[in-house]
Image: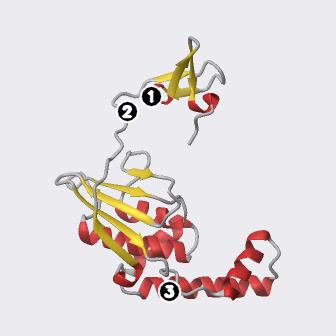
Amino acid sequence: MYESGLLDEVVRFHGHMCPGLALGIRAAEVARNEVGVNSPENPVVAIVETDLCPADAIQYLMGCTFGRGNLVHLDHGKNAFTFVRLRDNHVIRVVARPDAFGPPDPEFSTLFEKVRSGQASAEERATFEELQRRRAQAILTASLDRLFRVEPAEAQVPRRPRTVRWVVCASCGEATLESHTEERDGRRCCRRCLGKLG
């Protein structure tokens, strides 16, 4: 587990402590034990299958970022995380167990909907925050085996474009990486204008 100072830094980076952040903290713990933290001597790529709270913990604790190209998001809607140690191609996939957040809790679900819709009273918000705190604490203290299935995996690490060449989209006029454009009817357009975002 991490020293409290580092946990405080992750919480500051994300903005608050919640069960999702706690889950990402623990997934990063597995990765740090298995493949190490990203560094010039130990290049690591993290592939996250969610764009929710756990991804922030993984980014912060593993030293992987979108800007450096070693944090990849695959929009699968799963709390699943693949880590690739590039020097020897050691790959693991860390998958949260279905009950990682604890047993179903009708009170939590009801309060979550009220808070999300802005209909919760101050007392209900306080109760929800306390339930969130308890769930996060349970995740932070649970055994890793109870939270995750860890398996060897294969990963195709998406390669970034070798050159960064910007072109202006003929439709919207915005500068776009050439690798993210296509030519259609003699005009080079971005994916957004071609309706190919995804």
Q: Is residue 45 left or right of residue 8?
A: left
Q: Which of marks 1 and 2 is nearer the N terminus?
A: 2
Q: Residues within 10 Å of mark 3 (few under 14, many from 20)?
A: some
Whole-percent x and y of residue 16? Answer: 58, 72
**Helix, strand or loop under label 1:** helix
Vertical side of 96 occupied by 86: above or below: above
Q: Which residue lies furthest to the left in this view?
A: 88
Identified by mark 2, the residue type is: Pro
Q: Circle 3 is placed at which residue position?
A: 137
Image check: 196 left or right of 76?
right
Residue at 41% x, 80% y is 147
The residue wearing badge 1 is: 179
Kind of residue sitting beneath label 3: Gln
| Mark toward the start of the polypeptide (2 vs 3) | 3
**Quadrant assignment, res 24:** bottom left
- Tag 2's secondary structure? loop
Q: Residue at x 65, y 21 (%)?
A: 171
In the foreground, 147 or 125: 147
What residue is pinned by disc 2? Answer: 161
Tell me the CA gap for discs 2 and 3: 41 Å
Which quadrant: the C terminus? top right
Q: In this view, does 57 lie above or below 180?
A: below
Q: Which mark is residue 70?
A: none
